[in-house]
Image: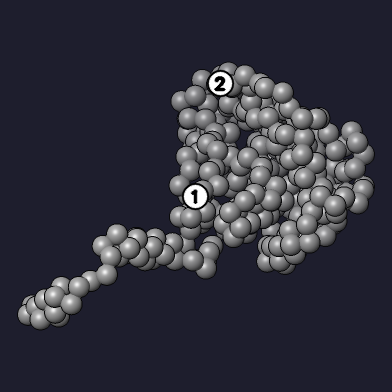
Amino acid sequence: MAGINLQQLRKKRGYTQEYMAGVIGVSRPTYIQIEKGERELTVSEAQKLAALFGVSLDGFLKGEAPLEPKVILDKAKPKAHPEGAGIRVPADKVRKFKEVLLYILGKVGAQPNIGQTALYKILYFIDFDYFENYGKKLIGATYIKNKFGPTPVEFKSLIEEMEKEKSIETVKSRYFQFEQRKYLPLANPDLNLISGAEMDFIDKQLARLAGKNARELSDFSHGDAPWKITEDGKKIDYDLVFEREAPYTNHNYLQEWADAGALDMLKELGPMSKEEYDYYMNLPDYV
């Protein structure tokens, strides 16, 4: 399995050795041996790591680097850019993401269970639930499906910029036996960029989700239709919220679409004449 630079891949994603060990089900010392090339990966372990990095098993064994979209944070109103230039985040969206993140961290960032992984899932549910309820995006981040749930692509670039601005601090801590990456706010959010209705919605989502740990949130996200339908490593489409079923929604979309279709058909057919009504009412019953 030569050609796999696990240390480079791990550091690029911001994963700890302990986290990687947990992914493949070995101890940290054993994982360190694997990373140093002193122990070979088993096929099962390689499959788990390939899924984590969003590449095929064959590609992983050949040392192919996972494809990661380039994220560009605009500082002002963007000019035209060529297709394929990566994920370009408009300046107003950058500001909104930052302020919402500061708001969330001010509310729950200090809780021992809220590390990076838990935060990813909370952001996902805030974004996708808001879109389902109101038909528009609150943050509008781009989420990719990975083994442990939805991951906001813009997050890393935004955090790096916020660290430079000294509005956020990244710290490492421990949650039970796991090493954890936490983000603590060093500034207050600009509430002029978050409406009262949006704050109320975020507060309700935090009350529902922020008591769960990273594993619970990841498991919960795995049952959601947008994540289930999307292929590994691919962008999750917001419109997939309309494929949801309970407990992720209060709607029965299949029934609602069937009812809407029936109403549309009745509108097309127009009112039924007395002759048609009498005909259908007098049809014999068949058992």
Mark 1 neighbour class, 10 Å CA radius: few under 14, some 14 to 19, many 20 or more = some
Q: How many marks?
A: 2
In three-dimensional space, the C-alpha distance between marks 1 and 2, rounded to whole angstroms, equals 33 Å
SS class, disc 2: loop
The residue lying at 65 percent from left, 30 percent from top is 87
Classify 231 as above or below 258: above
Closer-to-camera residue (154/189): 189
Classify 169 as above or below 72: below
Task: Answer left or right for 170 relative to 281.
Answer: right
Closer-to-camera residue (83/277): 277
Whichever of labels 1 and 2 marks the residue nearer the N terminus, that label is: 2
Task: Answer left or right for 127 relative to 95.
Answer: left
- Residue 105 position within the rendered picture, expressed as x and y whole percent measured from the top left: 82, 53
- Name the amino acid type tagged 1: Leu
The residue lying at 14 percent from left, 75 percent from top is 275
The residue lying at 29 percent from left, 59 percent from top is 268
Classify 93 as above or below 129: above
Rendering quarter of residue 181: top right
Q: Which residue is mark 2?
A: 63
The residue lying at 56 percent from left, 21 percent from top is 63
Q: Which residue is mark 1?
A: 240
Classify 36 as above or below 203: above
- Residue 168 position within the rendered picture, expressed as x and y whole percent measured from the top left: 88, 43
- Name the amino acid type tagged 2: Gly
Closer-to-camera residue (254/230): 254
